[in-house]
Amino acid sequence: MAENGRRGWEDEERGPGALHHGFVLMEALLEKLKILNCDQELLEKHNMKPLSRHYFVSSPYLAANPGEQFYVFTIMAAWLINSMGRSFTRPQEDDEPTATSANILAELRALGVKVDFPPSKLKSGSGEHVCFVLNALAEHVLKRRGFSFKRPNYPTETTEEESVMDDHAELMLNETDHIVEEDDEDEDNLVDLEALTLQSTLREAAAVAASKPDEIMRSTLDVAKWNLEVERVLPLLKVTIRTDNKDWRVHVDQMHQHQEAIKSSLHEAKGYIGKLEEDISRTLEKVSSREKYMNKQLEGIISEHRAAQAKLSEVRELYQRASGGVAQRTRLLAELSEELEKVKQEMEERGSSMSDGAAVVKIKQSASKLKQEIVRMDVRAGVVAHMLLHAKLKHKSDISFHMHASPAV
């Protein structure tokens, strides 16, 4: 994200045309490669397709294969360096991209070209930096061969008479007003020329009969002018019959064309597949050889590792056994700790109660409450005794009253 922002800032600094500078470099590179005959000397030898106009241009609107582009870039750079008489080993597909890019930039610096970007800019195989490197190498090869671009000499403008009609104009039968219909479905698209000729002949005869003069008309035109007019109009009278896609002849021709295309593509694909098979087999051999080498080199370390793993398993087993007893003792310790906490709490409660005299205060309060209740009970007992005495006295008085009253009656 930061790299894209920095690149956008650089483009703004250089101007609005900086985004299209890669296309300009690619156009110039293609012209130089055509002069150097790159297609025959390089691409055909490596079974590569010709380069397109924007092959090395990086754009989100162009389909690209970074791996293939980087490989073609390294092969072309090596070919250009070797064309200058310098020795440069042809890179392989399994080489390190950064190291290959650094070697190419080193050769470019040795030629006196100023390079102010790192080799990582070339890893994508496309972009302005790739086009710049190839352009610089191609330019040095052209200088070594003594080639130089010159300014074009433009011819003076001369006014010529414009041709009135095109010599290659053709009259299409589908623009005629009358087409003869045929019953055969396979020949619907064919035009009956005999019917057209007969129809035009009849029309001409009718027109001649209608406009036949009473006297013989003699032409006053020049024969040479008439011949020139005939030569001018003759190409317009060519008849072209359009073929229909439903015709079986068209299908046969298409089948032959597709067969030839398949054969050519198959031959090209066989070459690519054979090369790919060789590369894969070579890579597998390298992998197997390196695997064997690593196994031999690490055999002692592997045995030590196995012994250490065995010791580690024994230690883990002992640890598990010891951890079982530790867990049981830990549980017992937790239970004892809980009981100890309870005993401590009870002791603290008793000690606090003995030290602050709360029990004595409670006893005194209870004694005072008992005294009050005793007083109340005494008062109530006195009241009850008084009421009982009063009731007895009243009963005695009633009895004595009745006793004194009975003799009088």
Image (spheres, rainbow, N blue to C red):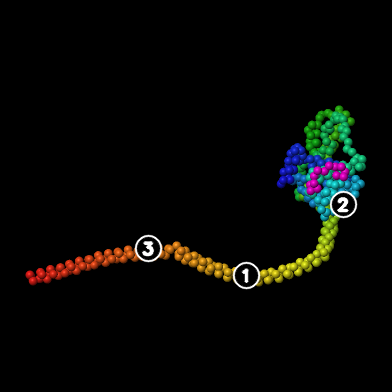
Compared with 402, 71 (above or below) is above
Q: Which residue is drawn at 82% across and 64% down?
A: 297
Label 3 secondary element: helix
Among the two numbered marks 2 and 3 on one chain, the one whose residue lies closer to the N terminus: 2
> Residue type at mark 2?
Arg
Quick check: marks 2 and 3 in contact, CB under 8 Å?
Answer: no
- Residue extending farthest to the left is 408
Q: Which of 196 and 190 is in front in this view?
A: 190
> Residue type at mark 3?
Gln
The part of the image, by quadrant, that contains residue 305 is bottom right
Among the two numbered marks 3 and 1 on one chain, the one whose residue lies closer to the N terminus: 1
Label 2 secondary element: loop
Q: Which residue is drawn at 21% across and 67% down?
A: 389
Measuring from the top left, give residue 206's x and y in whole percent: 79, 36
Q: Residues within 10 Å of mark 3 (few under 14, many from 20)?
A: few
Please give the residue where the numbered disc 1 appears in the rendered image. 326
Q: Residues within 10 Å of mark 1 (few under 14, many from 20)?
A: few
Compared across the picture, whether 206 is left or right of 383 comes to: right
Numbered badge on residue 365: 3
Q: Which of marks 3 and 1 is in front?
A: 3
Measuring from the top left, give residue 228's x and y in whole percent: 87, 32
Compared across the picture, whether 310 is left or right of 138 comes to: left
The magenta segment: 109-122
Compared with 31, 350 (above or below) is below
Q: Which residue is drawn at 68% across and 71% down?
A: 318
Please give the residue where the numbered disc 2 appears in the rendered image. 90
Compared with 208, 396 (above or below) is below
